[in-house]
Amino acid sequence: MVEHVDFEALAERIDVAAPRPSRANGARPRYPTVLMIKILMLQQLYNLADDALEYQLLDRRSFLRFLDLTEISLLVK
C-alpha cells in the first residue's frame, strides 16, 4: 500500500483542509496525521471496530510495520 499511496502528501492536504487545534492550552501531544490516516485505512480495510482495531494494533507485527512503528510503547502511552 505504501508503494501506491503518498501518505505524506495526503497528510499535508488534510492538515490544510482540517487544521487541528493548537496545544497552547496544555493539551496532550497529537499523533501525526500520517499515522492516523494509516490507522483509519487499516480499520476500513479489515472492517474493524475501534476495540478490535486496538487489539490488532497491539497484536500484529504487520500492522506495526505498516505504521512504521518499531516500538509498541508509542501506541500504549
Image (tube, rainbow, N blue to C red):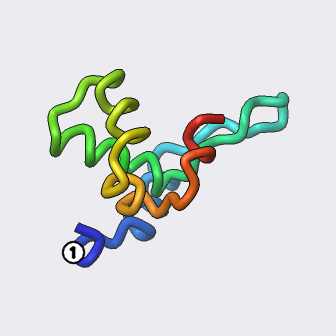
Residue 1 position (above or below residue 14) = below
Camera-nearest residue between 37 and 60: 60
Query: Would residue 43 appear left or right of 38 to someone viewing this image?
Result: left
Q: Quadrant of residue 64?
A: bottom left
Residue 3 position (above or below residue 7) = below
Q: Residue at x 57, y 54 (%)?
A: 71
Q: Residue at x 76, y 30 (%)?
A: 27
Residue 22 position (above or below residue 5) = above
- Residue type (three-letter) at the residue carrying disc 1: His
Q: Position of residue 23 (x, y in %)?
A: 77, 38
According to the picture, the residue beneath numbered tag 1 turns out to be: 4
Q: Position of residue 57 (x, y in %)?
A: 39, 41
The residue at the far bottom in this view is: 3
Count neighbours of disc 1 (C-alpha within 10 A) and say few if under 14, some if 14 to 19, many if 20 or more.
Answer: few
Q: Position of residue 75 (x, y in %)?
A: 55, 41
Query: Would residue 51 appear left or right of 47 to someone viewing this image?
Result: right
Query: Would residue 12 appear left or right of 37 to someone viewing this image?
Result: right
Camera-nearest residue between 6 and 64: 64
Quadrant the N terminus occupies: bottom left
Q: Residue at x 21, y 74 (%)?
A: 4
Camera-nearest residue between 40 and 13: 40
Q: Secondary structure at mark 1?
A: loop
For the image shown, how many numbered marks are present on the structure?
Answer: 1
Quadrant the C terminus occupies: top right
Q: Quadrant of residue 58?
A: top left
Query: Would residue 65 appear left or right of 70 to someone viewing this image?
Result: left
